């Protein structure tokens, strides 16, 4: 008889690891009210001793954070953009900071200057939670976390999810079935690479997307090549910096002037004094307006100040040329491409497209299959989920990550948004029910706690 898992998590990136943490930890320290702190203090030891955590499996073709590692390595990224308080350990938002202290690696925490006069009054600012961790520190922390959390890891590619709540069968590409009561999809980038239409005639050997095979072709940046990098966000800047390190002649072309911002969305979305209000206002909008709100909030890409400083220094020294405008193709040669910029023809040996991805979950085979077997509305490439991140009519099939943007907000694909999303899933599954004060409105909220701000809202709890 086949083993049945309580929870099957599809995807082993930061979202999958955050989901595993949320499923196996009894509560989150930074989410507790004062009454819940008292309840924890009285019953936590007994609860932890008696509690049997859910039996969880994680399914992914690679290992933990394998795609993340490949992308960061290819771009030689040293620092995360998200602060040290944003990570997959749902039990304690201070744990990455504690890991750095315990391993004597506090020099791998960067003060990027994100804490302004307004944020300085927050306790987490004084605690260093707005500093940026190095990627090496973050990856080792995640490896340590994954090793500590009980789970089974299954290597494979999921092609379909069939069945119903409490009785799902997750099929792998090789035909292997996995039985699970609950399924959580943490699938990462929700769409195909975006390419400027004007460059469609350029052959593959002369142009590639920066994320192609997790950045594998970035190795081609070498040997005094003349390189055109297209894009106006952080990835485009990172590609340009990498090309400069490899002694290439680089032109960075963006549609508009580069925008400076510490995080890819405004700090107000991370400021706990205001974040709940922003999220609530977002959830009151119709789906089409939410989509526009997401686009406006993210703003088409931005660059942290410390990256911008390096770019301006490279530009001032003549090593980098920054241009704004639309790319226009002039001529394609056997080993070069002529591009029209500012009315002048420029010849390049290689073009790197760093324009990001187009939001369209239907590009993912598993999502396409789900839409075929369990149709749900799609708006702007994102599936419309329930307020508790459930797919269609299911109560135990959840989606976290960028695919859940319409229900989580502009930061759905970020580490902070992932933390919030998996908390919603854990609450919807009543995994934190022992903490609830059933005498209060908030204590009766089982899933998305933002609905507590709406006096007319109602919710039903489902168990694993």
Image (spheres, rainbow, N blue to C red):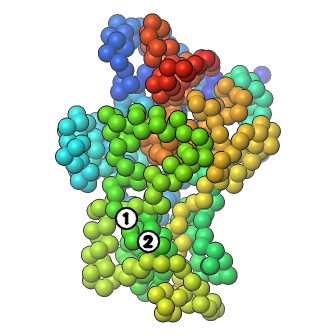
Up-down relation of residue 333 to residue 374 (above or below): below
Can residue 127 be spotted in the picture?
A: no
Q: Kindly identify which residue carries mark 2.
A: 256
The spot of residue 193 in percent (x, y) is: 61, 63
User: Which quadrant would residue 198 be assigned to in this image?
Assistant: bottom right
Q: Kindly identify which residue carries mark 1.
A: 259
Up-down relation of residue 295 to residue 338 (above or below): above
Residue at image location 47% in from the left, 82% down from the top: 227
Relative to 99, is 342 on the left or the right? right
Relative to 305, is 440 on the left or the right? right
Can residue 254 be spotted in the picture?
A: yes
Secondary-structure class at tag 2 = loop
**Along the line of sight, the residue nearer the viewer: 50 or 128:** 128
The spot of residue 396 in percent (x, y) is: 66, 26
In which quadrant will I find the C terminus?
top right
Residue at image location 23% in from the left, 47% down from the top: 115
């Amino acid at each position: 008889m086949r083993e049945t898992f309580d929870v099957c998590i599809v995807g082993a990136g930061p979202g999958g690891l955050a989901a595993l943490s949320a499923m196996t930890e009894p509560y989150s320290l930074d989410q507790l009210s004062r009454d819940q702190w008292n309840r924890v203090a009285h019953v936590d030891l007994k609860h932890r001793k008696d509690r049997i955590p859910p039996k969880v499996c994680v399914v992914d073709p690679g290992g933990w954070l394998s795609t993340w590692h490949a992308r960061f390595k290819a771009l030689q990224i040293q620092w995360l953009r998200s602060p040290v308080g944003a990570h997959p350990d749902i039990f304690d938002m201070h744990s990455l900071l504690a890991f750095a202290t315990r391993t004597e690696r506090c020099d791998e925490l960067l003060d990027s200057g994100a804490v302004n006069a307004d944020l300085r009054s927050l306790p987490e600012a004084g605690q260093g939670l707005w500093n940026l961790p190095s990627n090496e520190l973050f990856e080792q922390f995640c490896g340590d976390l994954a090793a500590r959390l009980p789970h089974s890891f299954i290597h494979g590619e999921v092609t379909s999810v069939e069945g119903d709540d409490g009785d799902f069968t997750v099929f792998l590409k090789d035909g292997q079935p996995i039985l699970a009561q609950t399924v959580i999809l943490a699938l990462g980038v929700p769409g195909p690479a975006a390419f400027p239409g004007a460059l469609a005639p350029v052959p593959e050997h002369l142009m590639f997307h920066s994320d192609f095979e997790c950045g594998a072709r970035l190795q081609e940046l070498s040997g005094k090549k003349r390189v055109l990098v297209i894009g106006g966000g952080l990835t485009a800047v990172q590609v340009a910096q990498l090309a400069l390190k490899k002694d290439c002649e680089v032109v960075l072309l963006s549609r508009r002037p580069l925008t400076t911002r510490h995080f890819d969305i405004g700090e107000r979305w991370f400021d706990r004094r205001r974040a709940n209000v922003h999220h609530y206002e977002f959830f009151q909008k119709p789906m089409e307006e939410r989509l526009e709100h997401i686009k406006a909030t993210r703003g088409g890409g931005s660059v942290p100040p410390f990256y911008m400083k390096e770019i301006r220094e490279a530009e001032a020294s003549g090593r980098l040329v920054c241009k704004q405008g639309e790319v226009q193709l002039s001529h394609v040669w056997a080993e070069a491409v002529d591009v029209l910029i500012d009315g002048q023809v420029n010849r390049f040996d290689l073009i790197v497209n760093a324009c990001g991805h187009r939001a369209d979950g239907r590009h993912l085979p598993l999502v396409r299959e789900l839409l075929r077997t369990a149709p749900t509305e799609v708006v702007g490439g994102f599936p419309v989920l329930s307020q508790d991140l459930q797919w269609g009519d299911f109560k135990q099939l959840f989606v976290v990550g960028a695919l859940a943007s319409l229900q989580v907000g502009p930061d759905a694909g970020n580490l902070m948004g992932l933390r919030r999303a998996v908390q919603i899933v854990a609450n919807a599954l009543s995994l934190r029910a022992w903490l609830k004060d059933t005498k209060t409105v908030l204590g009766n909220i089982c899933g998305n706690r933002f609905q507590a701000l709406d006096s007319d809202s109602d919710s039903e709890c489902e168990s694993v």
